[in-house]
Image (cartoon, rainbow, N blue to C red):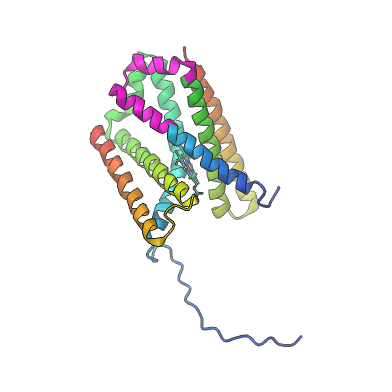
Amino acid sequence: MAVGAHYGARDWLAQRVTAVVMTLYTLLIGLIVLWHGGLDYASWKAMFASTAFRVVSFLFMASLLFHAWVGMRNILMDYAKPTSLRLSLQVAVVCVLVAYAGWTVQVLWGHA
Amino acid sequence: MAAVERPVVKPRPIYLNLLAIRQPLPAIVSILHRISGALLFAVGIPLLLWFVQTSLASGAGYATAFGPLSSSLGKLVLLAIAWAYIHHVLAGLRHLALDLHIGTDLAPTRTASALVMVVALLLTLIVAVRLW
Ligand code: HEM
């Protein structure tokens, strides 16, 4: 297991960049929904049919999943002290995140 | 080995019951940022994916996706997630400001922490009003 801080600064930065990406996407969605005064099924569906919107949404989800990895790892480093426990929990977190990623692709590209 | 002469130190109080120590406001914002992040990871993301997937499936699916909101339990769960996201984003933005060395003095830090708490609760209240 690589120890040391070589990945620390990179992940610290990544967590900030992903935070900005997610904030912008959140504002975008909020503005779209407010602008339309809520979306009915037809316009909701039309929005997700656009390739541009799917790609932007995927970018949001990719940021989110990477951000969540860095964040959950930081939390585990603080509380899960025994190495074996910490590594097991980290593996569990990675499995969950990979499952979320697969599910995301299915959600965004699995409909007409 | 020669005995090292140690200065006599008064025993310092060890008092680390986190529930009994009065936490400064920034500490509360910070721990809530952590708790909300973990909550979003475990509950928020799967709910979001389920919601978008179900709502896009068909017109009937769209109705199904909003179904849980007809029960009080469903509303409470959404409200908790909404608070978690709002608090996490606001506390996160406060973090980014601090990283840029904006508002790092004690007084502005306190004000910003209070602002994060209050604005997050107010926005959550608006969500609650819209839900009920
Ligand atoms: C569902 C989405 C999100 C999840 C699951 C999530 C999860 C987490 C977790 C688990 C942490 C670690 C907390 C800690 O170490 O105490 C964290 C940290 C952080 N989050 Fe998020 N987050 C999400 C969205 C956001 C958004 C939209 C922002 C935008 C401002 C944001 C900003 C931050 C920042 C700046 C940190 C670093 C704080 C630090 O270094 O202590 N997060 N996030």
Q: Which residue is drawn at 27% across and 28% down?
A: B70
Give the mark count: 0
**Visible in this render: residue B34?**
no
Decide: is B90 above or below B68.
Answer: below
In magenta segment, residue A70: no
The range drawn in magenta is A25-52
* Residue B80 on image: x %, y %: 35, 40
Assign the magenta stretch its main secondary structure.
Answer: helix
Can you tell which quarter of the image residue B92 is in? top left
> Is B83 on the left or on the right of B130, as rendered?
right
Q: Residue at x 57, y 86 (%)?
A: B8
* Residue B63 on image: x %, y %: 32, 20
Decide: is A15 above or below B111.
Answer: above
B37 or B26: which is nearer to us? Answer: B26
Q: Residue at x 59, y 55 (%)?
A: A81
* Residue B86 on image: x %, y %: 37, 41
Q: Residue at x 26, y 33 (%)?
A: B131
A23 or B125: which is nearer to us? Answer: A23
B63 or A111: which is nearer to us? Answer: A111
Can you tell which quarter of the image residue B78 is in? top left
In magenta segment, residue A46: yes
Can you tell which quarter of the image residue B106 is in? bottom left
